[in-house]
Amino acid sequence: MVCSRATDSCTFGMERSERDDRDAAGWSLVNSEVSDDEHWMVINGRRWRRTDPELPENLVVRLTSHLGRARSAVGVSRRSGDAEVTAAARVRVGLAKRGLGERGPRWWECAIDDRIERAREALEELDRLAP
């Protein structure tokens, strides 16, 4: 099974705890496992850093929205052959992933206040780049 975003009506709008088969970003966890330290998840044999579980839900939702739109922009711009737009969209993907704690400094090694501030800064920059 391929992991997919939560877009069906039965999971849309639910709290994180109600979507027990999805991670914080909405990815299906049916074919995944959490590593021993719970900082990583493994999907189809590949290890991925988990979204910071301490981030406020409103930040996670907004950053995840930006991430999805940026990923879509990467695909559209690649298909159209526009390298400049692709590069800009990839910057947005990176900002969103850093805000979620999936890239950059390991979130579990940083103070919670610093992690929330990093997420807010990423969100502000994303709002400026792609409102």
Image (tube, rainbow, N blue to C red):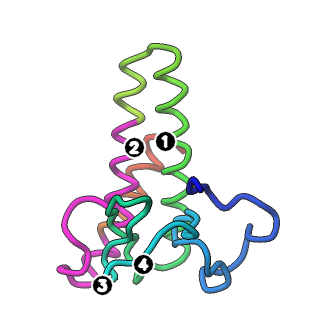
What residue lies at 34% left-to-right and 40% top-to-bottom? 91
* Residue type at the position of mark 2: Arg
Report how far apart the C-alphas of labels 2 and 3 lie in the structure: 31 Å
Residue placed under numbered mark 1 in the picture: 70
Specify the quadrant that holds the N terminus: bottom right
Residue behind mark 4: 55
Q: Is residue 94 left or right of residue 106?
A: right
Residue 92: assigned label? 2
Using the numbered discs, state the Cα–Cα distance from disc 1 to disc 4 in whole angstroms.
Answer: 20 Å
Determine the secondary structure under disc 1: helix
Q: CA distance from mark 4 to mark 2?
A: 19 Å
Q: Counting residues from the N terminus, which is met first, the one under dot 4 or under dot 2?
A: 4
The kind of secondary structure element at disc 3 is loop
Q: Residue at x 34, y 58 (%)?
A: 46
Q: Quadrant of the C terminus?
A: top right
- Depth check, mark 1 against mark 3: the one in front is 3
Residue 39 in the image, given as x and y percentages of width and height:
31, 77
